Amino acid sequence: MHIALWADGSATVGAGHLIRSRLVGQALRARGHRVHWLTPTPTGPASWAWRDIDFEQAAAPPQQGYDLLLGDGNDAQGPVLRPSVWLHDRPAGPHPEVDLVIDAAAQASDYPSVLACLGPAYRLLQNIFFATPWRGGTGLLIVPGGTDATDLLPSLATTLTAAQRQAARVVGCDDAKARRLGFAAGLGSLTAAELAQRMATASVCLVTASTVAWEALAVGCPVVAVEVVVNQADSAAALRSLGVPVLPRDGLGNLAEQVTAAKVCPAPIDDQAAERIADRIEDLRWTRQQNVLRSARYGDARQLYDWAIDPAVAKSRLRPAEITWEGHLRWLATSLSDADSRLFIAEDAQGPTGTVRVTRQADVATVSITVAPERRGQGMGRRLLAALQEFATDRRFAHRLRALIRSDNTASLVCFEKAGYTPVDEIEPGVYRLEKIV
């Protein structure tokens, strides 16, 4: 693919947008795709992010000349090139009218009509933070966001004790400002490696509720965060769910006590987010090039639920149980966010024909299919399995496909065997395991 990567690196957006878009771009380029960066502010506060890559200045995302647009900023500007992928900060900006959204803090229900990469598995951080373990120290490290564009530092200085200020080092502003506010010194702008090393030897990191908070958590350092701007709301909520103290900007009264009591809060993040996002982008390209499967969205919940509670489908489950609407929504949200699962809807000129789900563990993926009641007896099951095999092969999703089928589900057994699946064993009384190498 020839990919246009448009990133808004202006002072009002910040360096985090450039960092995360560069990480995805590098992952795609490593897979052999052509990636061309465009930005409205190549000399902005994070111009270092553009070194050694092909970029040019552009006021808005391109509308032609590329196979895919990957955009990053506070809102998706339109009209945009299709297919289009957007790294989005909900709730800032309008709902992006694109094909795929990457949002590490939102819920699946926030994006009913588009595909979404959601949750900690898709939180983009530079690998140096995962590779630099916290060793502990005595100093307070303060990162007030970029170049302290929101002027948070004076409020922090007012609410910290004199001893805390004198032991603190400040990243992102000049020494003169830091000293004027009572801090020992400012460190200016640091590279990712330098920042990671500082985090590794700090006693506590006092940060904004932004990417830098997750960088400190990846290092393993205790964190206290301040929610500074509206597009940090989801990140702040996710940090609170981990036990991280997150204070509102206008509620810093007990900040000094929070800093003193801060503890390590392990976070469910890892260093594979860029690869997972690249997978989803390549999935999007694959689904647009064939005419059977499309990726399911949260807005498909009712259709999937109706198929799930169909009596014939319920009877064929390995362990029949009542499916509630609320439980179904939880299952769907989890499935759509799972980096090792894919959920597809099959369609033709007459409408939806069924659904297929595949969940991977190591090199084996377990398959389940459901044919729409009104389309049964038309060979749709074999068509679903053929399309799934094409996906698994083309996308190298798994080396083996597996199905677990009840012995009294004759129709499914015949369908899978005709599709080339071979019975392997009976994993429990009345349940057969079938497999196929792809």
Image (cartoon, helix red, strand yellow):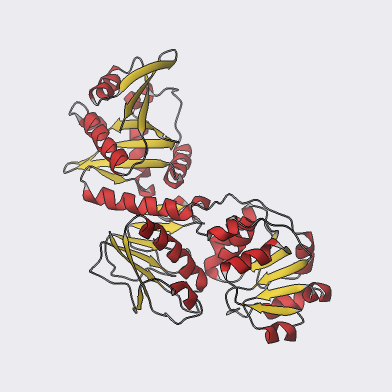
Q: Is residue 435 left or right of residue 120?
A: left
Q: Nearer the viewer, residue 27 or 365?
A: 27
Measured as percent of width and height from the top left, residue 354 is found at: 27, 36
Look at the picture and state if 360 lies above or below 50. above
Residue 27: name its quadrant: bottom left
Q: Is residue 131 left or right of residue 323?
A: right
Residue pushed farthest front? 52
Measured as percent of width and height from the top left, residue 252 is found at: 72, 70
Q: Is residue 254 visible?
A: no
The count of marks equals: 0
Q: Nearer the viewer, residue 108 or 337?
A: 337
Q: Is residue 9 left or right of residue 227?
A: left
Measured as percent of width and height from the top left, residue 108 is found at: 45, 51
Q: Nearer the viewer, residue 62 or 74?
A: 62
Residue pushed farthest top? 429
Q: Nearer the viewer, residue 108 or 388?
A: 388
Look at the picture and state if 302 lies above or below 382. below
The quadrant the C terminus occupies is top left
Question: Which residue is at 25% across, 38% downward?
Answer: 387
Residue 256: name its quadrant: bottom right
